[in-house]
Image (spheres, rainbow, N blue to C red):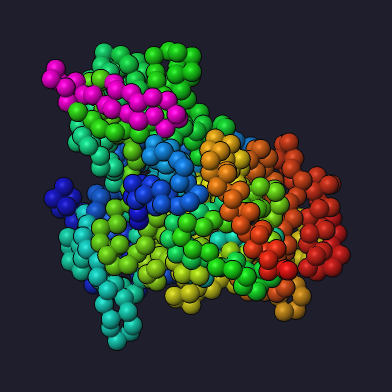
Amino acid sequence: MPTQEEIVDALAGMTLFSDLSAPELQGVAHSFDERYFPAGERVIRQDLTGSAFYVILDGEAQIVVDGSPRATLGRGEFFGEVSVLLGEPPVADVVALRPLRCLVIPGPQVEGFLVAHPRVMFRMLQAQARRLRNANRWRS
Amino acid sequence: MAELSARRRKERPFAPGTYPLVVVGSGPGGIQVSYALSRLGVPHAVISADEGAGGMFRRWPLFQRLLSWTKPFAPPHRESRAFERYDWNSLVAEEPEYRSLMPEFMDGSSSFPSRPEMERNVAAFAERAGVAVRYGCRWTATRRESGPDGDGFVLETTDGEYRCPAVVFAIGVAEPFVPPSPGSDLAVHYAGTRPAETYAGRRVFIIGKQNSGFELASGLLPWARQIILASPSPAKLSVNTKSLVGIRARYVQPYEDHVLGGGVSVLDAAIERLERTPDGAIRADLRRTDGGGDLGVEVDDVIAATGFVAPLLDLPALGVATAGRSGVPAQTPWWESATVPGIYFAGTISQGATGLQKNGLPPNSGGVHGARYNARVLAGHVARTRFGIERPTAPIDPAAIVDRLVEEATGSPELWHQKAYLAWVASMADDGGWRDAGIQPLAHVLDAPGPDALILTIEANADGAIYPVVYLRTARKTVERAIEPDPFLDFGGPDQRRQFAEAAAGLSGAVRA
């Protein structure tokens, strides 16, 4: 089990949180739970409501659509935001590829968290822009 | 051990030796799981370091009044299953005479039982239901062992060694924890708080803004000169989160004093260091996490309401992975260690099986009213998977499926106390008929490969609405359908019956509402 300080250190090394001050990072680590998923466990279930926003602290997760693997995510990457932001069920399963530790921001708290931390929102927007660019490249 | 009478020592069951299953702990979790295992015919031993049943309620809460209520005059009959919805503190039994014992011990002064009342409630259940425990036997270490019958565990105890292929730890989350920081030795943990009157006229700094911090603040309001509560994250109130996440209504008075300027300060700040001043006070240096400037305060006492962790001894070294602030073991949906098969958890430590946490709402496994059902379902799972003891599933009359859905949605205490966590399952048999597959973890049934099933939960959203949800699980996919909420939480109205019928028809064709 990582300590609160270790979680703060992990967050500090992530692009998503790179603009936050040390006290702000401590507030984030203290506000949200860390969860562990063994390899093979479903973290997010396609088409089922009520999920959350996950930031990977350690391990790997696989995005699976209709049973087909689509992408792999690792430390510092995040998932679940599309469903939470749109208020719609996820369009993919996310499965722990190997033991996975995540910081979890519950869906109903994501808007308040992003509004309170606009630099995190900006970093998330940048990440989404990259994903969109890559998706467009793949299609063309 | 030395305090056990000669008579009780002579009567002690479960001498060290080899058992098919060992349960460690005699709090509500240990007593509940042992009771359920016994009713299923699962042979097992129970050991406990304590001198009697009750677990943490033999000592806490500090101010001797629980956070969980029991309403003796709720609408359902006291010995009925439906009454359990209104009784968060009794253990659950098959026999009506052992059900809902809590009201018997309450003096009527509060719907929140006192600590001694709760302790008597758990002890009475153990005694009347015949739950045998070897008290005064402290588990001290664990190791793995391979034998002719497969892998197992050796539990070292103060009485000797216990060998078993599987073990259920019901050891609570009650080991005081203070995160290390400069000067943290100047803080006394919540568990070491002195009698309230000794804080008369003193300035008290409380680290932590969860229930234990606000319980302390509430208890010290009549005595302390000044109270400051601080932690890095903002205080949450249960009435705002619409869940048990946050400060319960009973402890909100200090928060109201804060917002009304009544002498209590509630700060969002990390504690940088504590230092003794030359005049014997304690100085706390704080870094605000809400964007404000750094602060320094001088106080007479610092109390760390920084929570408790699970007393796992050497289990992490054995490979048991843990997660979260309380360091509880990461668990499968059936409360088995996610990393060490054969190690199970019951009681408040079962919160390590986190479930889906839909809409950000965690299960109530940290309280007796949630953990008691986890323990019962766990006992059934262990009986089935390790002992081959399977209770036959009862057929459900197809004409009565909607009645049954309404009945479970309206009155099932398992579904009400463990929202979006425990589910009632009606599975489809090979002959096309419905079978009652009982209460199961939602995270398991959603991911199970089959058979086709109708899965019912009670769920809640962030707006505070409470409503049933029906999932249709087929080999192809699982479909979720929320049933319309009702202001009186009665889901037997014509609109809801029609929706239940439509949901059930998804598996079996037309169903009469």
Is residue B295 part of the magenta span, yes or no? yes
In the rendered image, the vertical position of residue B367 relative to residue B511, given as above or below: above
Decide which of B263, B392 is in the foreground and name it. B263
- The residue at the point 39 percent across, 68 percent down is B339
- Residue A44: x and y in percent read 59, 60
- What segment carries the magenta color? B276-297
In the rendered image, the vertical position of residue B69 relative to residue B446, given as above or below: above
- The residue at the point 73 percent across, 69 percent down is A140
- The residue at the point 41 percent across, 48 percent down is A12
- The residue at the point 37 percent across, 67 percent down is B343
User: Is residue B372 among what the camera can see?
Assistant: no
In the rendered image, the vertical position of residue B410 relative to residue B428, given as above or below: above
Give the number of marks. Answer: 0
- Residue B181: x and y in percent read 25, 39
- Residue B365: x and y in percent read 48, 50
Decide which of A137, B414 is in the foreground and name it. A137
Is residue B160 part of the magenta span, yes or no? no
Q: Is A94 left or right of B347, judged from the image as shown?
A: right
